[in-house]
Amino acid sequence: MAGESLCPVLTSQEHRQLLNHAKAVDHGRIPWGLLTLMTAVCFAAAGYGVLRWLHSGAIAVGALLLGFAMLLLQILMHECAHGTSTRHRRLNTVAGWLIGLWVLTPFFSFRRGHVAHHRHAGTVHDPTAAPRGSQRGQRIVELLIRSRLVPVLYLGGVFWPYFTFDLRSEGRRSPKRLALYAFNLASIAGLHLVLAWQLGAARYALLLAGAFWVSAMLYEYLFTQNQHIGLLPDSPQERDCHSRDQHGFSRSIRLKCGGLLLYFNLHKEHHICPQVPYRSLPRVHAWLQRHRPDILDFTSHELGILSRRRNLRVYAPTAGDHDS
């Protein structure tokens, strides 16, 4: 197998220095979180508004606009799940729960699943991990990926694992948790039934399905294909890895619109410092560029918007990128 080099190591001292640098006060920052929320609201309002048109293409236009809004809202929900969207813990929870209603995701299930993703990233216990070795349906999955029309990696590796995490977490389920999960699903259904009643059931069903697909395709090409797919640590891990050891199986990409996407493209930096807010990720990146460029170079790619990786290696991950 190509690429036998060991993953570079970020020491404990370097990690502490990096965290201190990332948490330093940085005045005059652009309020990207607020701008992202306002942009999402505008796109969503426009998406719903075009349903009032009588033109036959209104649903397609609305789905495109609402799809962009759903992508931005998913990124905001991710920040809320980390408790770093605002300094107020309860406000993060309330905002995340409300956003989850719009993007068809039970927030508490997502939050617990995402905590597990960070805790177990690079191990077989990661709920979002790509399957290893020969799997039933492998050829079908690879065919769907090559079609470029089905966001199979997002649906099977992001949305569904988080959507069902509270149902699949054996040993941690409780009547209270299941009741909250059921209430969250009922709230999601209730919101969209009200919108369907207001906008027309058939038209809204087409709008929501189209918007979900658009957001899934955007997430697939911007993030899912690039963040973890095809990567493993130097040897498959059964034990959990510290965040400073996760740079070997997470990848960052360069995007000009990173601020509006809350720097979700700086995913390696996010996994190394999951406790810092999105606005500090450029500081993490700058520190690594200055002090440890080998950490960035091990797996990071410079891809344009919606660029496609040449070899996704869904079923044959390797340590580091070897197909650049």
Image (cartoon, rainbow, N blue to C red):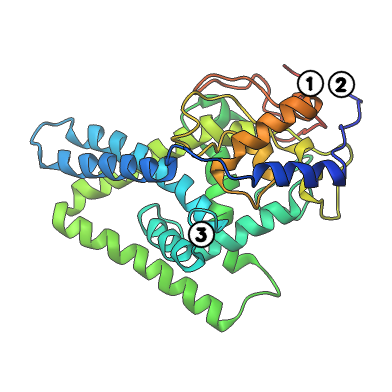
Position in image of residue 205 (x %, y %): 26, 49
The mark that comes first in sequence, 3 or 2, is 2
Give the image location of residue 114, x and y in percent.
61, 55
Marks 2 and 1, how far apart in space?
A: 7 Å
Left or right, residue 314 beside residue 166:
right
Residue under pointer 2: 2
Between circles 3 and 2, the one closer to the viewer is 3
Q: Residues within 10 Å of mark 1 (few under 14, many from 20)?
A: some
Task: Classify residue 231 as left or right of residue 260.
Answer: right
Disc 3 residue crowd, few under 14, some 14–19, many 20+, Cα 10 Å: few
SS for callout 3: loop
SS at circle 2? loop
From the image, which quarter does the C terminus lie in? top right
How crowded pointer 2 is (Cα within 10 Å; few <14, some 14-19, many 20+) is rated as: few
The residue shown at (46%, 29%) is 149
- The residue furthest top is 324
Mark 2: amino acid: Ala
Residue 138 visible in this rendered orientation of the protein: no
Residue 267 at least partly seen: yes
| Front in this rendered view, residue 248 or 284 | 284
Is residue 152 positioned above or below 23 on the image?
above
* Residue occupying the point 52% across, 51% down: 79
**Tags 3 and 2 touching, CB below 8 Å:** no
Q: Please, which residue is most extreme toward the left here?
A: 54
Q: Which residue is mark 3?
A: 87
